[in-house]
Image (spheres, grey):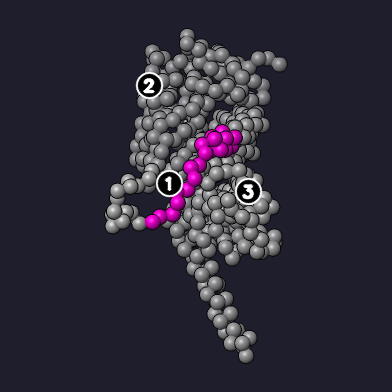
Amino acid sequence: MATDQQTTSDTDEFLKGLFAQNPVFVQVLGTCPTLAVTNSATNALAMGLATTFVLVMSNAAVSAIRNFVPKQVRIVSYILVISTFVTVVDYLIQAISLDLYKALGAFIALIVVNCIILGRAEAFASKNNVKRSVLDGAGMGVGFTIALFCLGSVRELVGKGSLFGLSLFGSHYQGWVIMILPAGGFFTLAAWLQFFNWRAQRRARAAAAAAPEVAR
Amino acid sequence: MNAPANKSPATRPPATLPPAPPTPVWPLYRTLVGIGVFCGLLIVAAYSFTKDPIRRNKVVARQRAVLQVIPGATQVGTFQRAADGSYTLVADDSEGDGLVFAGFDAQQQLLGVAIEARGSGYGDDLRVLYAYSFQQQAIVGLKVIETHETPGLGADVDTDPGYSANYRQLDVALGADQKALAHPVEFVKQGQKQQPWQIDGITGATITTRGIATMVSKSVAATAPSLQARVHDFRLPSK
């Protein structure tokens, strides 16, 4: 049976998902919804929040039952738990806004097969206590939401000249329609990945340059 | 199972780890059934909690669409077509086939009815709501309520002012026998509209605009004669 591990502080457990281990920009997971629903900032934010809810709740539930689930049936148990919370979030979004529900379409149901969620359940929640699992889920969820918003805001700004539906460049702005189309998702994701890799390489170079001075 | 006693050392299989103890079946059943029951209860509880708000949202969205599509309407009445062709007022949250939505002004004067039509577009099925005016015998408004068309092309039919103008006064007058349209609605390519019963397409969204024209043409041809014959069925209860 898995054992609890306590190597990082609670704050670091939450913060790691935001940038250092961001599920989209660093781990490159969950790219299906990342590309599909980020044609506007509103859709991106809503999908990010829905996924965060499912991540937090499923991590908490998987962690709570980790000592009772035999390893032979652990995957089916986790999927059952995840699909339950996805169904709950599906009902909640319909109750909050039908327009938002229609905009997100089939991708709400497809949260079930988002690899970030099953990945965190298997890799983290099944080995850690409820508190740390909730923090991990919240951090990864917020990191996923940030990533989706980064894509959605750029695509909506360039593609429609608006943000959250509010026109920013006036009626004369001719949007780049391709940014709203699926190809625009690939372009924008590639640009953000390049930025994050460049940032990581710059930090690594700075650390390498500082190392000899420390040794001296 | 034990190896036969007369097997020589040369043919004996190499030494392996002792087999894992068999997994008892009961904990597997208990776990899966327990989680299943918990998940089932949670889903039913969420459904019960959100059922009424979802129904309210659907009614509000439908009424908002009807008020947008029928010019001047301030009140909506939902009517269901009966087997004998008559229309009766039903609850606003009614669902099913044969529903039409009548729009009234503040004095409860009938302005027209909104009818839903569906058909194929370029990406997937399309659903539209169009307004039929009894007085003008014309389609006086159209709103796309479900679309999966390409953004910037087919998805813009609802916001393209030129295309929307097609449905502001589209002639669907009945013929002399009052049983069919005098002129079926026709689709023509952009800029070729000559007659009031023709619909101009949009270059770059031909399949979408042709699809909408076809579904509206079929729907209005099937419903306009019966609606016109039962115009007196559409009235709200006096306050």
Residue B85 coordinates in the image, percent (x, y): 47, 12
Magenta residues, start to end: B15-35
Q: Nearer the viewer, residue B155 or B24?
A: B24
Chain letter for mark 2: B
Disc 1 or disc 3, which is closer to the eye? 3
Q: Nearer the viewer, residue A40 or B137?
A: A40
Left or right: residue B84 compared with residue B76: left
**Residue type at mark 3?**
Ser
Whether marks 1 and 2 lie on the same chain: yes
**Residue type at mark 1?**
Thr
Label 3: state its secondary structure: helix
Residue located at (57% from left, 21% from top)? B94
**Residue type at mark 2?**
Ala
Residue B199 coordinates in the image, percent (x, y): 40, 35
Is residue B37 at all visible to an observer of this figure?
A: yes
Residue located at (51% from left, 36% from top)? B25
Q: Are marks 1 and 2 in contact (CB under 8 Å)?
A: no
Residue with the mark numbered 3: A63
Q: Is residue B178 above or below residue A20?
A: above
Label 1: state its secondary structure: loop
Residue with the mark numbered 1: B150
Label 2: state its secondary structure: loop
Residue B134 coordinates in the image, percent (x, y): 51, 21
Q: Nearer the viewer, residue A19 or B184?
A: A19
Residue located at (62% from left, 90% from top)? A216
Queried whether the magenta region covers residue B24, the answer comes back as: yes
